[in-house]
Amino acid sequence: MSENDNLQDADGKIELNTTETPQNTEASQVAETSTSEEPKASEKTENTPEKETVSEEIKDEQAKVEKEVVSEDTTEEPLEETKDVTETVSESTKKADAHVEEIEESNAEDAEDETNAERHEVESKDYHAMSMEQLVDEFETLLSDKKIQTIKSQVDEIKSEFHSKFGELLDEKKEEFLSEGGNEIDFYFTTPVKKRFNDAYKTYRNNLNAYYKNLESNLKQNLENRLAIIEEIKGLINVEENINTTYKHFKDLQEQWRNAGPIPRDRYNNAWNSYHHHVEVFYDFLHLNRDLRDMDFKHNLDQKTKIIERAEELAKDDNINRAFRELQVLHKLWKEELGPVDREYREDIWERFSNATKTIHDKRQAYYADLDKAHEANLVKKEEIIAKIDEISQDQPKSHQAWQKKIKEIEALRQDFFNAGKVPIKVNDATWTKFKTAVRNFNRNKNAFYKSLKKDQYDNLNKKLELIKIAEDNKDSEDFETTTSLMKKIQADWKNIGHVPRKDSDKIWKQFKKACNHYFDRMHEEKNAASKEEMAAFEEKSALLETVKAIELTGKPEKDIETIKDQINAWKSIGHIPSNKRFIEGKFNKAIDALFGKLDMDKAKLDMIKFENKLETLSKPDDTRLLDNEQNYIRKKISEIKGEINQLENNMQFFSNVDETNPLVRDVIKNIKNHKDNLQTWKDKLRKVKSMY
């Protein structure tokens, strides 16, 4: 049977695996193959070195393998080559480059959970600029749409931002509570959105705990399975059986390894290094055909070249995060899916892959450096906003309107602060504390003002309650002329009193408005009813006026006087007319005076008749104001006439010859007589007025 026959399966086909490195059957070929596959201490191995040192457990396993290989192999040359392999792996592990370490750390983290790589696909938003309601909405969306293990960083950011915003609100409400005289031990405040957040976070913690509890058990079992597979691969070199059977057993173990599932991240790189090491040791002891080995080398070279080309394309991609995530996948393929290549290409292809990786790493570092600069710029903005808040806090207005303006300014600055973006992590807490302190200082000054304002408001409340009592006491008054002025006055007083506590404002206003409206509605109803009667009276007086104008006197004074008095009485009996129609009263009096003027009788007697008619017009039940005015006027006229008589009589003393033949003396005597006659008429009028009371 030839060497190739040993590789044939039941169907006569040759099985190839990308992790295999077939060897020649002769001992010299084993030595040659081993030499060609082992990386030098200065080379980067396909087993990408990890940041952490190899665990003690893995070191022990490797030491056992080396000891077993030395004790069971009788060929000195392969023993030396195997020793070099182990030393090379260890040396390569120690000399890991930073850009490769970053990839290895990320892949180790993803390896703990095969779905954990999905965390890169979960979008992180600007949670800092969101309101509490928006943060909870986003939290609930993540819980319903994403796997629980992929949203940790987003949840941590949402939690931090929510607690910061709610903490600020809580401080503000607490200060208001204390400023109103509340006891700190009695303070309690919550909101519906806080309850929603608590419920969402409880769900998140419960689901995450359940996930990790299950994952911990699986990771532990998967690690045990993988270590067992390594042990079996180690044992294959001691099995005395047909090489074809051993080879198939080895392939079966490789398949089991691929399907063994995720393991703890801190054991990932060690386990893979140990696995690759023992796979290479197994190949060193296989007596396989060199052609198959070269075919495998060529396949691995082709695949790794494609990986390198894709990595070099990614190095030109401007989307840094996307390029880095795909680079992780390429490194995982390089490490987990592909085996070694021929020594003459090994250093070159690793150098190309490492250079592409470094380019992406450097671009990513530069990206984060720019991000840090942006965060520093955001810090400057936030410091300026805080300074403005401090400046506003130093000015303490004296009016409600001015404070409301300040409150709007602070609210705008708060929004600007939240929209300014993230700041460097190292100063995030300090900046937030400084911002809260500035806002808290403003709120304290504001609360102190409104606390003093509330005392004035309670005084205003008592004043307005007194006005309400006046309004309710007079709302049913029938004395519209007097009460209307009172009602208008208390309405003006209400406007001038000022603010009352908000909780009482609507209540007392409605009470006051109701009493006032009740009164004025009654007054307007009364006026509307009176207006109809007054318009009818006006129409009647208009007709009577035309009748008076058309009267023809008989020439008999007594009869004509009776006629005139009948018209006057008829006019008086008609009643009130609208105030804007009172001009007709003047027209009527003018018409009556014209009739009196046509009478042929003594002027003094006629004047007295007209005066008696006037008195009847002035006389009103329960209202003597018009008569009082008339009496005062008459008394004044009497006093004036007496003064004029005295003056004339005094003037008579200046004449040396008091003789009526003197024209001047005669005129003075005539004037004195006329004044005395006039005086008597006014005295008669005064007696008549007094008789009207």
Image: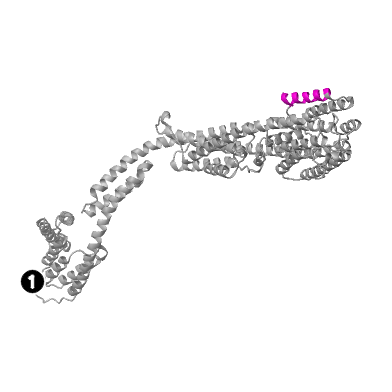
> Is there any visible trace of residue 571 in the rendered image?
yes
Q: Secondary structure at mark 1?
A: helix
Is residue 359 shown left or right of residue 494?
right
> Is there any visible trace of residue 655 in the rendered image?
no
Q: Amino acid at mark 1?
A: Glu
What residue is pinned by disc 1? 558
Query: Is residue 287 depicted above or below 401 in this figure?
Result: above
Locate residue 61, reporting x and y percent: 75, 25
* Magenta-colored segment: predominant secondary structure: helix
* Residue at the extreme front: 1
Camera-nearest residue between 230 and 654: 230
Query: Is residue 85 depicted above or below 338 in this figure?
Result: above
**For residue 124, which quarter of the picture?**
top right
Locate residue 467, reporting x and y percent: 29, 45
Camera-nearest residue between 487 and 194: 194
Locate residue 105, reporting x and y percent: 71, 33
Queried whether the magenta region covers residue 271, the answer comes back as: no
Camera-nearest residue between 657 and 677: 677
Magenta residue span: 53-71
For the N terminus, the image quarter is: top right
Q: Residue at x 32, y 48 (%)?
A: 510
Camera-nearest residue between 585 and 278: 278
Q: Residue at x 83, y 28 (%)?
A: 85
Locate residue 539, reporting x and y percent: 22, 70
Query: Is residue 317 depicted above or below 231 in this figure?
Result: below
For the C terminus, the image quarter is: bottom left
Is residue 264 shown left or right of residue 316?
left
Queried whether the magenta region covers residue 63, the answer comes back as: yes
**For residue 600, which quarter of the picture?**
bottom left
**For residue 152, which quarter of the picture?**
top right
Query: Is the image coloured rainbow, by chain, by secondary structure, or in one colour?
Result: one colour
Is residue 21 shown left or right of residue 227?
right
